[in-house]
Image (tube, rainbow, N blue to C red):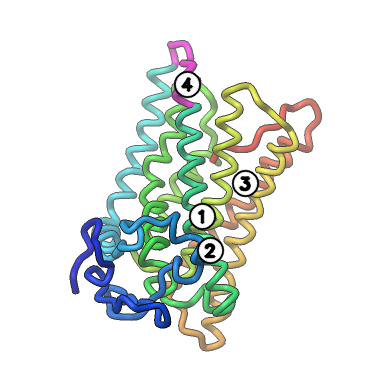
């Protein structure tokens, strides 16, 4: 089977697909020869918004890279923790940097990226749930459910974007803001878990990706606006509720998978992935809930959501 290394004129060259016609849609094959449908085949309105490059995405190389380099996120996280402390030491005797323009551009870029990711992933998730059922949306193999084509590309981009997202902390350090436990723990654990889930082809991954894109799209937009002086307690509270809701959904998804497995379903998600997900999302739920109580239930404090 041919590798898809870039833009192609005929997608069947990438996936050995039958091009189809007006009465019979194209049938694409995954790298393992299994049929899958492009998201544009389910939702025609997305076709003008989806490039040929996106539709031609073959996840084989990305998954192989993640699987062969599980040490990389560990090394990145270790370096991240060291550099945070080094940065604090360097900034100890200096004035905080303003960085207003750069911070605005950073947050708006991450918001735009997340909005695009949400647009590319949510339709497929909705389709999987409504057409195949909730259980299938958690258990069906990733490559046939969402891993190939446009949705697959934005899933891969989500995974690898967790490394540059560590730049959030750079701004905190340079501006001499607090880097608390929730902030760095969230960044480190999300990177490690997302990378491992992608490397092991987690069948429930689209749920995590879509909800994270949704929350980050709104959150980073708000943080961008705060650099311009806009602050609204109601908006900040809603964003915090979205963050907490994301953690509840994460726990429920990871808890549902072993229940389906116990009933005999063949779910393409390792025990380590769903057990680790329960621990991770459960800890997030507790930490974000405690943050919300401290922030919004204490009088006289300015309301601002947590920048994860």
Q: Is residue 5 visible?
A: yes
15 vs 252, nearest the viewer: 15
286 in magenta: no
Q: Which residue is mark 1?
A: 119
State the image coordinates of residue 142 (x, y, percent, origin top left). 41, 71
Q: Residue at x 62, y 46 (%)?
A: 287
Q: Residue at x 58, y 70 (%)?
A: 255
126 vs 173, nearest the viewer: 126
Q: Which residue is mark 4?
A: 101
Point out the image quarter for the C terminus: top right
Q: Viewer-nearest of labels 3 and 4?
A: 4
Magenta-tinted stretch: 92-103
State the image coordinates of residue 19 (x, y, percent, origin top left). 31, 75
Q: Which residue is mark 2?
A: 123
Disc 1 is placed on an element classified as helix
Q: Viewer-nearest of labels 2 and 4?
A: 2
């Amino acid at each position: 089977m041919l590798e898809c290394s870039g833009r192609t004129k005929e997608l069947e060259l990438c996936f050995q697909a039958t091009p189809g016609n007006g009465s019979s849609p194209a049938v694409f094959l995954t790298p393992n020869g299994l049929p899958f449908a492009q998201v544009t085949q389910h939702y025609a309105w997305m076709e003008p918004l989806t490039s040929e490059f996106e539709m031609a995405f073959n996840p084989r190389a990305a998954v192989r890279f993640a699987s062969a380099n599980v040490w990389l996120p560990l090394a990145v996280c270790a370096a991240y923790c060291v550099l945070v402390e080094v940065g604090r030491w360097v900034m100890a005797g200096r004035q905080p940097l303003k960085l207003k323009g750069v911070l605005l551009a950073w947050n708006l870029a991450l918001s735009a990226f997340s909005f695009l990711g949400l647009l590319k992933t949510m339709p497929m998730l909705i389709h999987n749930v409504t057409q195949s059922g909730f259980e299938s949306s958690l258990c069906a193999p990733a490559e046939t459910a969402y891993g190939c084509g446009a949705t697959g590309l934005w899933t891969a981009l989500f995974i690898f974007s967790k490394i540059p997202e560590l730049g959030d902390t750079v701004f905190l350090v340079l501006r001499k803001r607090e880097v608390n436990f929730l902030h760095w723990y969230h960044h480190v654990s999300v990177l490690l878990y997302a990378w491992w889930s992608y490397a092991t082809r987690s069948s429930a991954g689209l749920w995590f990706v879509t909800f994270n894109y949704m929350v980050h799209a709104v959150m980073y937009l708000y943080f961008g606006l705060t650099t311009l002086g806009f602050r609204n307690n109601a908006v900040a509270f809603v964003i915090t509720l979205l963050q907490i809701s994301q953690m509840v959904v994460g726990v429920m998804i990871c808890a549902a998978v072993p229940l389906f497995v116990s009933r005999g379903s063949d779910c393409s998600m390792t025990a380590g992935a769903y057990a680790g997900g329960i621990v991770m999302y459960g800890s997030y739920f507790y930490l974000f809930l405690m943050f919300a109580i401290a922030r919004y239930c204490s009088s006289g404090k300015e309301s601002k959501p947590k920048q994860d």
